[in-house]
Image: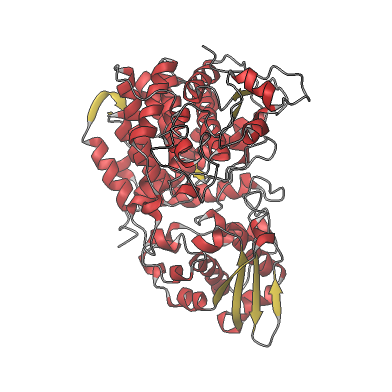
Amino acid sequence: KHFFRLCPWPPGSPPDAAMLSKVLGVAQRPCGRSLGRLLAGASRPCSATTVTLPGDSNQALGIAQYAKDFIGGKYGDKVDASVWERVEMFHTDSVMCGISALALRTNAPTVLREEALSYPDPKGATVFGSGAKCAPEKAICANASAVREWDSNGTVFGYNPNIPGHTAGEFGHNDFYPVVMAAAQVTGDIDGKKALLAMICLDEIRGRLAEVFSLKSYKIDHVVHGAIASAAVYGALLGASAEQIESAIGMAVAHYIPFRAIRAGKQLSDSKGASAAISTEAAVLSMRRAMRGFVGPKDIFRNPEAIFRFFEPTTGTPASQDNIDITLGNKVRWGVGPSPFNLVLSTAGSDFAVCGMHFKLGLYEHQSAGALEGLLSALVHNPELAAGGADAIEGINIVAYEPAFGIIGDPAKKDPKTRQSADHSMAFIVSRILVKALQAGKVPGAMDAAWMELMLSPYDYGKDALYDPATRALMAKISFSHGGPEYDAKYPDGIPTQIDITLKGGKQISSGMVMYPSGHARNTTADLRQILAHKNRMLGDIVFSDRGQVDSFVQSLVNMKSASASDVCGLYDFDWSSMRSHDCIDG
């Protein structure tokens, strides 16, 4: 069994189609899809720091073996310090988002937490703020829902130009760390370093899948990639065999595919924020079933009727998102063939997927980050803008790329009635941060300080903020323009956005095109440690009664790498009864 087929050709000498066919064990056949995309991914020079799963191999089994090998230490202790730091920062950020969402009594996290506690399991896992053990998949669902509720934790855009074929541009978020924590609590023998290594592994699998297959292109929700990674990592930590993990991945893909119906429409529901949680619950349940002996579909990535080859056929019909031949009479279309992509996974060094993920410096949909950076820059460099007040502003035009222009720049979202809709409305997001600056009448003279002082908090999306007259008045002054091919071509490498503010009297203030805003993986100017520390305290103050408790809790997350297995098991626990009391933020 060849789980991994490492490049057999000399470095710097990419194979031709005939050689690749020979290596992959397939004949060169006249199929509707050429080997071009597979060649693009497979022609990467050999590397001691990566594993390549070719499209004509069993990638489900390969992912399973990769997870077991990586977490099990096969590749040695060769992960760069920058990767450890990055995953620690993302994990800490996610936890602070989660517990503050619970403190403000948001609906889905509260419902799912209560549901989890109704499934007691002495060999299970715990929810935030409790030592009581419950069914692992229920605890994971509750915690992942809380982490995602604010839509303020990490983001990936599925773009790595350093790896050929890895630029599909799928979304994703750092919602899945509770999978690792639950496994640690179930086994009781996973220390902090191993837990963080497993988180790196989970982000690597889901992040690389986001780079090679765009789910959103087919109206499938992006959480599928995270569910696949969750099954693999949970199984690896629990000691499942590679075949059992393959089975769980097959079940997750064959039985539980969420569509973007949960994100359609002007007003969004709890399903938007809980999508990752619900899909991961299903993935972990599938893993537990597989470990009990249930056998799911094998080799799911090459299955012609699973989502990958169904939407991107590799045999029998031209590869086209606009014209997919799905007629049952096309026997070649439904026959044996490769998956649509090669998958490259890192094993050492610094080029891990998590290092290409992005932070949100407050609460906002990440595709609005370019507009926020542009607005803050305009405020910092033009003090008269904040001092002049709202009446001095004639209009604001935001130039954006697709998909931002069509998703969060949709004019229909200028009248949000739910928090979930407001945080996907660029007009609302920009207006809230501008309202804060105008009310203060001034802003700091440096960008990092401006991000911290004007940081959007949960209260900027609460029931009172939704209908704030000053916010609504500014929203009415905002218009959107599509930047066209020039802007579209620069995404997802960056977040190309420009904001132009026209003052009464005719003066125009323009940000120019923003590509890499603060928090973006390719931004080199922001002091992330400082800004995220401010964010952690902002969210922690919602939960804990004094700053000392906040700092102590955050420090335990920051120092996780040195935590014992026992400490890891209790990392999410705190005194729920002494948590600050709040009315539900949504009314």
- In the orientation shown, which residue stands out farthest toward the top? 1
Q: Is residue 119 left or right of residue 212?
A: left
Taking depth in this image into account, of 568 and 11 the one nearest to the observer is 11
Residue farthest along the right direction in this orientation:
12
Q: Relative to residue 17, is residue 581 drawn left or right?
A: left
Above-or-below relation of 336 to 278 = above
Residue located 42% across and 14% down the image: 241
Taking depth in this image into account, of 282 and 126 the one nearest to the observer is 282
Coloring basis for residues: secondary structure
Compared to residue 36, the image places residue 297 above or below, namely above
Q: Is residue 184 visible?
A: no
* Residue found farthest to the bottom: 505
Q: Is residue 24 above or below residue 106?
A: above
Residue 481 image point, x, y percent: 60, 70
Residue that appears at 59% across and 57% down: 369
Locate residue 350, reporting x and y percent. Answer: 67, 30
Q: Quadrant of residue 278?
A: top left
- Where on the picture, by quarter, is residue 118? top left
Q: How many marks?
A: 0
**In-front residue for pair 227/305:** 305
| x 43%, y 31%: residue | 230
Is residue 572 visible in the rendered structure shown here?
yes
In this rendering, the answer to whether 129 lies above or below 150 is above
Instruction: Name the image quarter holding the C terminus.
Output: bottom left
Q: x%, y% of residue 106?
A: 33, 53
Position in image of residue 559 (x %, y %): 54, 31
